[in-house]
Image (tube, rainbow, N blue to C red):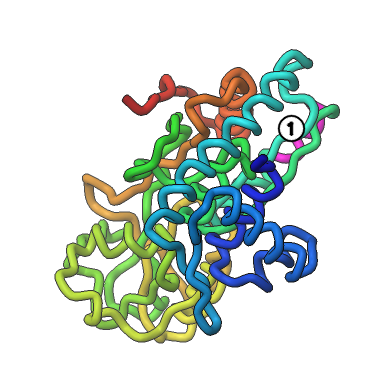
Amino acid sequence: MITLRQLRYFDALLRHRHFGRAAEACNVSQPALSMQIRDLEKLLGAALVERRIGQVVPTEIGAVVARRTEAILGAVHDLTALAQSARRPLSGSLRLGVIPSLAPYVLPRVLPRLQESHPDLRLEVHETQTKALLSELAIGALDTAMLALPVEDADVATLPLFEDPFLLALPAADPLPAGTRALATHVDQRRLILLEEGHCLRDQALAYCTMARRDSVTGLGASSLATVMQLVANNYGVTLVPEIASDTEVRDDRVKLLRFAAPEPKRTIGLAWRPTSPRIEDFLLLARLVTDALGVTTLPQPHFPP
């Protein structure tokens, strides 16, 4: 009989594409994980992965099984959450994912209120990029995620929380006067510094600048906004910074910020969760707490996939 342990190990193997890293993520030895994968393949009567040097890739049937595995693990998590939903709102365990360009700026304002108003809640926060958040959401490793909307090609319910405008960050010596309303043409594409590939903030900045060629961007990149802002301060280039991060990241007299002319470039921040999750009341309550902490006055209705 197929076990949930085998499915969890198989899912971890395909996410990490490496037996050693998958075993580490599952807190088991590599031989133990390998044995469970072999047992699963025997039960199904098919090879699920190709074992290559330094990498594991799914076979054709393995990719199909992987999609079914995601659905099964997500359903199992929802079953557990159904029992938890009978408790008081926002109590017990809640696993929240947050993208890196939000976590340092939103969580310090939200977590104290959350702890004060819901002391029985055990919040687990995981900060990573959108693709990884959606993968973990699908299998039930996360309950909900805070990220930039819309989420393309994902079977998730979403709820917009707030709009986050972008500001143009320039070296203080740049000739554009303070108070100027910036235009897309003011963004020197040859000097545009962005986060590394995989960060949704990078794609949003590129989309606003309507760049036909990504290789026109400077080779400078970073994994954090803090590093990007230091590069700007030292006159290596310019960048687009989310307004929610500006108070934290722009405390340097060597950097000046300009607002864009209307319509301002912006991103929509929201919550996402599996549409089958029974904890929607918890998510709506969390959304209200976030918007209250940030001073947002309106909260739209959630959107469910067709």
Residue 271 is at least partly visible in this image = no
Q: Secondary structure at mark 1?
A: helix
Question: Magenta span has 220?
Answer: no
The image quarter in which residue 248 lies = bottom right
Q: Residue at x 52, y 74 (%)?
A: 51
Would residue 197 appear left or right of 271 to someone viewing this image? left
Where 152 sits versus 9, above or below? above
Q: Residue at x 80, y 36 (%)?
A: 122
Residue 201's x, y, as percent?
40, 59
Where 53 sits versus 142, above or below? below
Residue 149's x, y, as percent?
38, 42
Where 153 sits versus 52, above or below? above
Front position in the image: 17 or 217 = 17
Residue position for label 1: 114
Which SS does the magenta portion mostly show? helix
Front position in the image: 58 or 25 = 58
Front position in the image: 191 or 60 = 60
Q: Residue at x 78, y 25 (%)?
A: 91
Where 9 sits versus 113, above or below? below
Residue 235's x, y, as percent?
41, 85
The image quarter in which residue 251 lies = bottom right
Label 1 crowd (10 A; few <14 / some 14-19 / many >=20): some
Residue 169 is at least partly visible in this image = yes
Kind of residue at badge 1: Leu
Residue furthest toward the right?
A: 120
Q: Which residues are magenta?
A: 111-118
Question: Magenta span has 113?
Answer: yes
Residue 198's x, y, as percent?
43, 65
